[in-house]
Image (cartoon, rainbow, N blue to C red):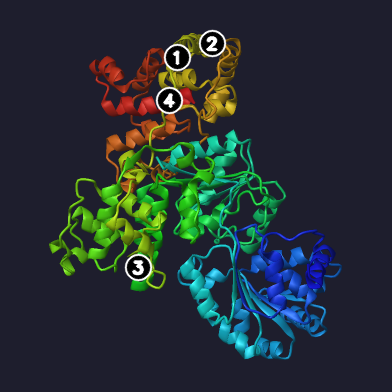
């Protein structure tokens, strides 16, 4: 072992308290200190920061670290200051600082006390800053999150393209280290080219996170998805978790739903002010909040080691995004679980967003989405898929059941001849097209390419029509994973047949693969998919009906005014034993639960205990009050005593539609004072209708009309008095 290596280890202990390096850290640091350019690809949690922090502390001058986010800079500066006696060892320079603060930072740098300076790329565009750096001893430049340089990276920043010219305007031969956790071979090429790296060394660590479990589930509607999320979180004991969604509004709705169901959660998105975002971040780090419901604005540079669950409520725009976001889980090396909910309609939404983009960006976005779809629908090892995407080979037998497809393997089919057909089709189309075009050719789809280039006239067009698109996508993906095909780096997405693939065409051999899952057959993404109920407990139902009769007699109201049949049936299915659970039952508002519920809860609890009944753990999702705009307007209008005709006209409702809305409002537990609407109805008629419902076996309007029509009572009168009765008595 060389003397210099020993020095590095001593420095590691002195500055950071560690006794040994991880992975390639030592060699990377050595390379930086030798003044050579280097490209470092290291997964989240692999220790990238140390690769520039330690040499910066050991070398003469100040290291400039270019970082994309102000929040990220603050985290990094706070972290490095935590290892040092004084705060001036590290600073950041960005738009959040005032004139006086900037002057102090520059003074500390000039004194030689500041070893690390974090800047945004925009900071380097200002001539006064460049002039200052020209007169500063710069030890090296580190470009963090270097994937931002490439248009094929998941967070492309145009200003990153100018970094090289800005470095050169500061001084000659300044060493550069570029670091990222997510870079495909294409992105790596772009980074080296853009930064004009010379004689660079590449350090590419494995992208494999063996402690992370990957699973994709069909997205069967909002309620069902939330129910499954609750099951996941409660099943794991309420761990620290991040749920990624696309829309800001959804972060807030989801956080509210989780809080209602006993899981402390907070939303996080770019529309919140900086103070609120910082508060949420701090609450999460301090365990006050267990779950963050976030857009992609959250996560970059957030170092919380014990995140146990990462959930994608919406499928991400790229595999890079997915990999980085799932990489927030299990950073301490312990187990983490990553669940993604997928529905084809989510992809259609993302494709819509691309329509207004420039052609190049649209095509690029489409290719990235194609990879996401392939990942979601694959029946092969998800770990192998992810690692292959980043240019790494992986033996799926080493997954050890740490993805759903390896844990629950699908049936494999012999596809020797079909693989040969697919490879030949790529060659027939002159190795110039994407997977989608090859599939279109095989199934005989009429598309732009097929028609414009007359591919439909080629032999083999439509030869695989009977197999379908899902089958051929499976074949081409497996051919990629097996090294028979590759995607061109410079013209990303275009399929090429490898030498191995050409050998396969000449001499095909047995190949068995699982066929991709066809998510279009799963009735996905309905706005409100019905939730399956468990079996009705007839014995409990009989007891509940008996109790209802007794309570109704005691209160002097009809049985149905206490709880309707549908509510009793749900109680006898889901066994609610708390006031909160009872108020989640259909037709039971919190007010009604408090008014009538105590005896019912006691009965159910006693029944459950005596019969050793295991209640459904996912019983009922406690819902946020969901009043449509129309319902809210109707309630407000009645509060203002607006005539019903005006309410109809304002909300564009027919009479029956208005009555239905009023019925739904009072049935859900909201009181409505509609006495003013009954001023033209004779008091004796009101009393007759009221008395009918007080003694009736149900609140059926049809039954009431049959009983009262001979007394010259109109339909409208019965409808309105019934609404008043439900509001007064049942609520």
Front residue of this view, candidates 273 and 23 = 23
Tell which tag, 4 or 1, sits nearer the viewer.
4
Tell which tag, 2 or 1, sits nearer the viewer.
1
| Crowding near the residue tagged with mark 4, few <14, some 14–19, many ≥20 C-alpha atoms within 10 Å | few
Q: Which residue is mark 1?
A: 559
Q: CA distance from mark 2 to mark 1?
A: 10 Å
Q: Residue at x 65, y 57 (%)?
A: 45
Q: CA distance from mark 4 to mark 1?
A: 25 Å
Chain-order first, disc 4 or disc 3: 3
Q: Which residue is mark 4?
A: 533
Q: Secondary structure at mark 1?
A: helix
Chain-order first, disc 4 or disc 1: 4
Occupied quadrant, residue 703:
top left
Q: CA distance from mark 3 to mark 1?
A: 64 Å
Q: Which residue is mark 3?
A: 363
Q: CA distance from mark 4 to mark 3?
A: 44 Å
Q: Is residue 74 visible?
A: no
User: Which residue is most to the front?
Assistant: 507
Chain-order first, disc 2 or disc 1: 2
| Crowding near the residue tagged with mark 2, few <14, some 14–19, many ≥20 C-alpha atoms within 10 Å | few
Q: Secondary structure at mark 2?
A: helix
Residue 193 spot, x, y in % from top left = 51, 79
| Crowding near the residue tagged with mark 3, few <14, some 14–19, many ≥20 C-alpha atoms within 10 Å | some
Lateral position of residue 62 relative to residue 218, left or right? right
**Mark number for residue 554?**
2
| Crowding near the residue tagged with mark 1, few <14, some 14–19, many ≥20 C-alpha atoms within 10 Å | many
């Amino acid at each position: 072992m060389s003397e210099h290596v020993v020095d590095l280890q001593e420095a590691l202990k002195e500055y950071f308290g560690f006794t040994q390096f991880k992975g390639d850290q030592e060699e990377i640091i050595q390379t930086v200190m030798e003044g050579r350019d280097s490209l470092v690809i290291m997964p989240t949690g692999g220790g990238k920061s140390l690769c520039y922090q330690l040499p910066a502390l050991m070398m003469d001058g100040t290291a400039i670290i270019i970082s994309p986010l102000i929040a990220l800079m603050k985290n990094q500066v706070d972290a490095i200051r935590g290892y040092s006696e004084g705060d001036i060892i590290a600073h950041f320079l960005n738009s959040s600082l005032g004139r006086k603060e900037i002057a102090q930072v520059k003074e500390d740098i000039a004194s030689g006390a500041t070893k690390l300076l974090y800047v945004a790329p925009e900071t380097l565009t200002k001539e006064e800053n460049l002039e200052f750096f020209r007169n500063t001893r710069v030890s090296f430049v580190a470009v963090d999150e270097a994937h931002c340089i490439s248009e094929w990276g998941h967070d492309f920043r145009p200003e990153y393209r100018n970094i090289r010219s800005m470095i050169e305007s500061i001084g000659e031969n300044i060493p550069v280290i570029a670091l990222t956790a997510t870079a495909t071979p294409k992105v790596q090429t772009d980074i080296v080219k853009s930064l004009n790296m010379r004689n660079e060394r590449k350090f590419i660590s494995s992208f494999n996170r063996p402690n992370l479990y990957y699973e994709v589930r069909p997205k069967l509607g909002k309620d069902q998805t939330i129910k499954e999320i609750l099951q996941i979180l409660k099943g794991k004991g309420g761990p620290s978790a991040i749920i990624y969604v696309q829309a800001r509004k959804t972060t807030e709705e989801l956080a509210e739903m989780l809080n209602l169901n006993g899981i402390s959660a907070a939303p996080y998105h770019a529309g919140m002010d900086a103070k609120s975002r910082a508060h949420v971040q701090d609450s999460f780090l301090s365990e006050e909040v267990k779950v963050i419901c976030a857009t992609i604005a959250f996560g970059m540079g957030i170092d919380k080691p014990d995140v146990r669950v990462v959930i994608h409520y919406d499928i991400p725009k790229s595999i890079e995004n997915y990999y980085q976001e799932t990489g927030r889980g299990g950073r301490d090396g312990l187990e983490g679980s990553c669940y993604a909910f997928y529905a084809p309609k989510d992809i259609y939404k993302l494709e819509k967003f691309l329509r207004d983009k420039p052609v190049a960006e649209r095509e690029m976005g489409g290719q990235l989405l194609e990879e996401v779809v392939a990942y979601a629908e694959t029946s092969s090892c998800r770990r192998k898929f992810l690692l292959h995407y980043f240019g790494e080979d992986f033996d799926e037998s080493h997954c050890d059941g740490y993805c759903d497809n390896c844990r629950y393997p699908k049936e494999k089919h012999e596809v020797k001849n079909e693989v040969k057909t697919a490879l030949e089709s790529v060659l027939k189309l002159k190795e110039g097209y994407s997977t989608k075009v090859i599939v279109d050719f095989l199934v005989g789809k009429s598309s732009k390419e097929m028609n414009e280039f007359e591919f439909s006239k080629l032999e083999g067009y439509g030869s695989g029509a009977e197999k379908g698109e899902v089958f051929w996508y499976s074949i081409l993906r497996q051919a990629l994973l097996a090294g028979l095909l590759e995607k061109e780096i410079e013209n990303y997405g275009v399929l090429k047949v490898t030498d191995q693939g050409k050998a396969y065409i000449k001499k095909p051999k047995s190949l068995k693969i699982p066929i991709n899952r066809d998510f279009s057959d799963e009735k996905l993404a309905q706005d409100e998919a019905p939730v399956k109920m468990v079996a009705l407990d007839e014995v409990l139902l009989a007891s509940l009906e008996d109790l209802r009769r007794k309570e109704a007699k005691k209160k002097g109201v009809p049985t149905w005014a206490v709880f309707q049949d549908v509510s009793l049936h749900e109680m006898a299915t889901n066994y609610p034993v708390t006031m909160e659970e009872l108020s989640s039952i259909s037709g039971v508002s919190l007010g009604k639960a408090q008014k009538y519920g105590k005896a019912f809860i006691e009965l159910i609890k006693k029944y459950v205990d005596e019969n050793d009944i295991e209640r459904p753990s996912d019983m009922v999702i406690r819902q946020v009050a969901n009043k449509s705009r129309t319902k809210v307007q109707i309630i407000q209008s009645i509060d203002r005593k607006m005539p019903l005709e005006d309410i109809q006209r304002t909300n564009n409702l027919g009479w029956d539609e208005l009555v239905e809305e009023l019925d739904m409002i009072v049935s859900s537990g909201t009181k409505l004072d509609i006495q003013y609407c009954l001023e033209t109805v004779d008091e004796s008629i009101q009393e007759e209708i009221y008395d009918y419902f007080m003694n009736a076996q149900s609140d059926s309007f049809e039954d009431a009309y049959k009983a009262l029509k001979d007394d010259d009572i109109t339909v409208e009168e019965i409808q309105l008095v019934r609404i008043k009765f439900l509001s007064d008595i049942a609520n």
